[in-house]
Every structure is written in C-alpha cells, then in structure tokens.
Amino acid sequence: MIQEVLSEQKWFDLMESEDLRALTPLVYSHVNPYGTFELNMEERLHIKGVSI
C-alpha cells in the first residue's frame, strides 16, 4: 500500500524525510526485510563511550 501511494508523484512530492521514516524502515537501504545481514568479524564497530 505504501508503494502504491508513493508511486503517485503528487504524494511523493509532499513527503519529507521525516514522513518517510515514520512510514516504514524499509525506505532505507540498510534495512533488509529478509532477515539477512552482512557481518564483518574483521572490523570493529566504533561505539562512542565504549573502550576495550
């Protein structure tokens, strides 16, 4: 249903990034609806405030 509405240019033009974010996380490329993700065990995440 979201895809159908946003395929209409007049509705898409009305949307701001905050509106898209509120609709669904699937508008972001890093969200995978199939539950798979890439994990690089050679790379450490840099998390602010955490030191090892």
Image (cartoon, rainbow, N blue to C red):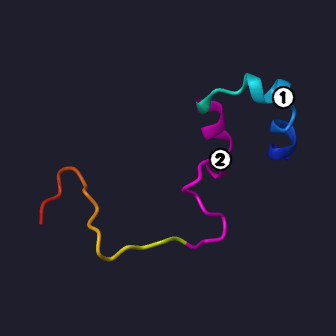
Disc 2 residue type? Val
Quarter occupied by residue 21: top right
In three-dimensional space, the C-alpha distance between marks 2 and 1, rounded to whole angstroms, equals 16 Å
User: Which badge, 2 or 1, comes first in the chain's sequence?
Assistant: 1
Q: Amino acid at mark 1?
A: Gln
Residue name at image x 66 percent, y 64 percent:
33
Decide whether residue 19 is among the magenta residues: yes
Residue 13, image x and y in percent?
Answer: 75, 24
Which residue is at 65% across, 37% downward?
20
Q: Quadrant of the C terminus?
A: bottom left
Q: Residues within 10 Å of mark 2 (few under 14, many from 20)?
A: some
In this rendering, would 38 be left or right of 23? left
| Residue ID at (29%, 69%) | 43
Residue 31, quarter of picture: bottom right
Is residue 14 found inside the magenta-colored segment of the image?
A: no
Residue 12 in the image: x percent, y percent?
77, 30
Who's the residue at 87% across and 43% down the image?
A: 4
Give the residue furthest to the bottom: 41
Question: Are the residues at dot 2 and dot 1 in contact (C-beta closer than 8 Å)?
Answer: no
Classed neighbour count for the residue bearing mark 1: other residues with Cα under 10 Å, few (<14), some (14–19), many (≥20): few
Magenta residues, start to end: 18-36
The kind of secondary structure element at disc 1 is helix
Which residue matches tag 2? Answer: 27
Find residue 31 and name its label.
none
Position of residue 9 relative to residue 5, above or below, is: above
Comparing marks 2 and 1, which lies closer to the viewer? 1
Q: Which residue is mark 1?
A: 9
Q: Secondary structure at mark 2?
A: helix
